[in-house]
Image (cartoon, rainbow, N blue to C red):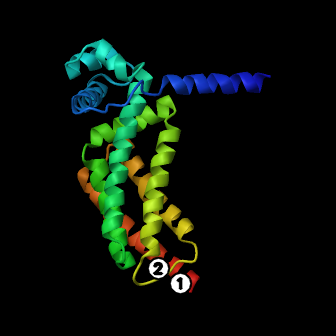
Amino acid sequence: MLQFSYSHFQIGIMATRKPRKRPSQSRSIVTVDAIFDATIQVLLGFGLERLTTTKVAERAGVSVGTLYQYFPNKEALLIAVLERHLSRVVEVVESACSRAHGQPTKTMVDAVVDAFFVAKLENKSASRALYAVSSELGGETVVSRSIARSERAIVDMLKSASDCRFENPAMVGFIASSAVVTPVQALLASKASTAEFEAVRLQLKTMIAAYLNEARRASN
């Protein structure tokens, strides 16, 4: 009985974190984009605990009522901002994977690692702050969906490699993807310098290329 009640409680919590409606007209899209950008600015300026929908609305130049037309509360807004951020990162990775289709694995590795670093470093402070949002607000579902999208793109790319075939491309794609995501998250958390990011980026290329080479040999 307790498990049944708790499940319904979880469903209720998740429902309150969903946007009220999706913007469909150009004016609405501009408004929501302004709200998203303002959320990042307030998050960076005041921190997660002091962020309020009132502060976000003021920074975005809209009324609180307008904000509530799209997001029922602070948590729903932050989850939506996190989802947009991760979606943009995934889109960059997907685009890189698409361009690298049919290329040698070395080219593929360079493309994916560079794309992920570029996407995450476009605004390091925002990326770092949104990792905290994910941790505090239970954004695991949003993160998991984004990781799954990236992995699908990487696996499809690996299947098209011009210089090898992998026995288990899904496993190879999972390991390659994880090898990139985890170090970048650690670098952001430690507020690493640009030089440190660059050093890790080059090392990851070497490491993942070596792994793919071994995986290729195991498949032959």
Residue 81, given in percent of the width and then of the height, sits at 36, 33
Q: Write down the quadrant of residue 94 in the picture.
A: bottom left
Which residue is pictured at 41% across the width and 78% down the height?
161
Q: Does 74 sit left or right of 43 as displayed?
A: right
Q: Residue furthest right?
A: 1
> Which is nearer the eye, 186 or 66?
66
| Amino acid type assigned to the residue bearing label 1 in the image | Arg
Q: Write down the quadrant of residue 86 in the picture.
A: top left
Secondary element type, mark 1 = helix
Q: Is residue 217 above or below residue 13?
A: below
> Which is nearer the eye, 131 or 194?
131
Looking at the rendered image, the quarter that the C terminus falls into is bottom right
- Residue at image mark 1: 217
| Amino acid type assigned to the residue bearing label 2 in the image | Asn
> Which is nearer the eye, 126 or 21?
21
Secondary element type, mark 2 = helix
- Residue at image mark 2: 213
Q: Is residue 14 above or below residue 66?
A: below
Which residue is pictured at 27% across the width and 54% down the height?
118
Whether pointer 1 and pointer 2 mark residues with C-beta atoms closer than 8 Å, the reply is yes
Residue 10, given in percent of the width and then of the height, sits at 62, 26
> Which is nearer the eye, 103 or 176?
103
